[in-house]
Image (tube, grey):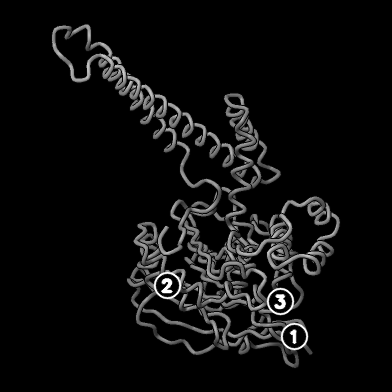
Amino acid sequence: MAEGIEITHGGVISVDPDRLRTTAGRVRAEAGAVACARQDLLAIPGLVDDVPLAGGIPALWSAAAQLRNVEDALERLAAGVGTMADVYELADLRARRAMLGAGDVGAARDLRRREERLLAGDPRLSALAERLQQSWRRGVTEGFVPGEERGSPPGAPGTALLLGLSPALFLLQSLLGWNARVWAEGVQRLMTSVAAENGVVRPMPLAPAPGVVVMADARSPAGVGPRPGDVVIHRGPAAAIPAGPSTLAGAVSRIPYGRSSQVRVETYRMDDGTTRFVAYIDGTRGGSAGEPWSYASNLRMYSEHAEADSYRAVAGALRDAGAGADTPVDLVGYSQGGMIAGLIAQSGEFDVQGVVTVGSPIEPVLPEDVLSVAVRHTDDPVAGLADGGSPNGTGSSDSLVIRRTVAPGHGTDPQVPAHLLDGYAETVRRAEASGDVRMARIGEHFAVLDTARSMTSTDYTARRITG
């Protein structure tokens, strides 16, 4: 961790269990070497009876006792590391089993058998794995609650019951009877409760939306124009660009934040005749009736797992640019745009090879050949709706989750300071300045774009027909 930045693969498992077991074996071997040294030391008096020793025999016994302490400490360490490897593997097995579909009976059976073997070796593992999951989930929103004020303890009698019976009443009681810390704790619990149901999204079709998506310049039958509920996309002029995004910071900077367009699509025509695309997708724009990037779209995608107008607009813009199932696409999205990016990546309509999300309220479960980069703030309530992501991570082995706390204790601030794109841009800058070698993989992923023979950028603006 550098400059408050945490960079991981995501999920509960921070270290590969097999690597931990290898480390445990090395520590155990060192314990064995210490045991041999202790035995050799104890053999000295019988070998050199006529040779004077500094401190005499008591000094040897004292040194042997110290070596025995070192040996015992190393054995305990090796055992602890081995147990942690089993705990990590058990947590991973359970997370993978939870992500399986109803038809994956064989895979579920194999995972369950491995769980049973682990538990047969050490019955404590189940409780330890549960404790690990709880600790991880607390950590993903650790900046949400103020730390300086004290109110009723989070586990005070009756709070859990009140939350279970009526989350709204729980929050009201927090607001009226407790201080800011307990109020924030109440909101945090409600947020994580909702996130547990919706935050991690498995690949499955979205419920369709009414209406159609049309390009503003598309020809329509005589006398037939867009109807209420349809989405009309206006295409801006294509503009040449000098280079691809090159870095994660470069990619985030191209999100059309603060511009009239909601989507930017870059087209890269490669020397081998193929074409690649990168789409940059902005976040929520407001609640006006004609705005596809609305709060209603957030709810439709997050709570209902259904197509929203903003989702359909992005897919329409990509199709208009020429993207399809056989053309590589990268998606970069902020907030609602991150949710759209994840859901499009799961749709199978495009050959998505990379997904970058910034402050997204979901984590999509992606194939192992997709590079996933998620940037989250632990005090951002929007990012908190992702529930920390999948317990066993998502995407390829090069995928990353980048976390930072920006405005500690301001999780319930109406201004949502931890969700601002400027703060996320700074988080990305710090991650790249950290020297973490894993960040270089992102640059390598984008570097191929700079070999294109031509590069253009097109802005798309979508509007919903209201009447």
The amino acid sitting under disc 2 is Ala
For the residues marked 2 and 3, what is the alpha-carbon distance in whole angstroms? 27 Å
* The N terminus sits in image quarter: bottom left
Q: Nearer the viewer, mark 1 or mark 2?
A: 2
Task: Using a 10 Å C-alpha cutoff, classify the residue at mark 1 as few (fewer than 14 neighbours), some (14 to 19) or many (20 or more).
Answer: some
Of 128 and 455, which appears nearest the observer?
128
Q: Quadrant of the C terminus?
A: bottom right
Could you tell which of marks 2 and 3 lies nearer the N-terminus? 2
Check disc 3 and give the amino acid type: Tyr
Q: Which mark is residue 289?
A: 1
Q: Secondary structure at mark 1?
A: loop
| N-term mark: 1 or 2 | 2
147, above or below 99, in the image = below
Residue 101: % across, % down: 67, 46
- Residue 417, image x and y in percent? 59, 75
Helix or strand or loop: what does disc 3 sit on?
A: helix
Q: Earlier in the sequence, mark 3 or mark 1?
A: 1
- Mark 3 sits on what residue? 295
